[in-house]
Image (tube, rainbow, N blue to C red):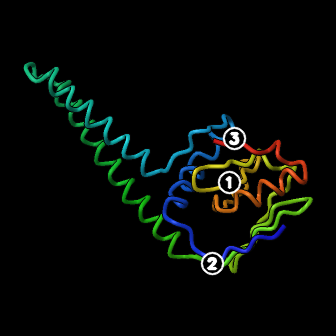
Amino acid sequence: MKLEINENENNNFYDELIFVQSNYKKLLIKKKKNVSRMTIVFLKYILISIVFGILTYIMYNETKDDFYYFALYIYGLLVIFAIVFIFITKRRINDSSNKFEKTKITLSDKDIEYKSLNSIYKIEWNNLAFILFNKYSICFIPKDGKGKIIAISIKYNDKISEYLKKHKKDNLIYEK
């Protein structure tokens, strides 16, 4: 089966893909159903740091010992780091969405092939750990931990699922 992708994906696709790529090794060890978008993860870190900062301020406001200042400093740093990572992630998302190339994804009896103008890579079926169906993407995750993840929009869900069932590879599907 060949799929030609002639349109760019939305930013949510790339945001989710960055999360999958960042947690590739963890996904191999422990499959996760709650794959999120990377910016949402950093927003949660900011919220948690602010809540703990406020709690520390309320609980230790009267004593104002060294722990009080140290804890507020650490929570402030966590918020700043999370904000910086959000901006870095947003930039990566924008870079990815602006560098669109027409691509072809081919599912054959022996492998999955990703082909664009600048690159070609394959994942053999015997090297495929699982196929992760997310909210915005379908990710083919290789076992070896060294290979690249092949990702495609969830718009192709029906075609991919149909191919996998037809070729008895639906045991590799891992859905949310």
x, y percentage for residue 140? 72, 53
Which residue: 90% across, 48% down? 168
Mark 3 is surrounded, within 10 Å at the Cα level, by few (under 14), some (14 to 19) or many (20 or more) other residues, namely: some
In this image, 57 relative to 125: left or right? Answer: left
Above or below: residue 83 compared with residue 100: above
Mark 2 or 3: in front is: 2
Q: Earlier in the sequence, mark 2 or mark 3?
A: 3
Q: Whole-Å distance between the Cαs marked 1 and 3?
A: 12 Å
**Alpha carbons under labels 2 and 3: distance apart:** 28 Å
Is residue 130 or residue 23 the one in the foreground?
Answer: 130
> Which residue was labeled with disc 2?
101
Disc 1 versus disc 3: nearer the observer: 1
- Residue displayed at 73% across by 55% down: 147
**Mark 3: amino acid:** Leu
**Real-space CA distance between mark 1 and mark 2, rounded to the nearest whole angstrom:** 18 Å
Q: Position of residue 24 (x, y in %)?
A: 63, 47
Residue to which mark 1 is pinned: 139
Question: At 51% across and 66% down in the image, what residue appears?
Answer: 10
Kindly indicate the quadrant of the structure image that contains residue 148.
bottom right
Horizontal and vertical percent for residue 138? 67, 55
* Residue at figure coordinates x 50%, y 57% from the top left: 15
At label 1, counting other C-alpha atoms closer than 10 Å, the crowd grade (few under 14, some 14-19, many 20 or more) is many
Picture quadrant where residue 176 is located? top right
Q: Secondary structure at mark 3?
A: helix
Residue hosting label 3:
28
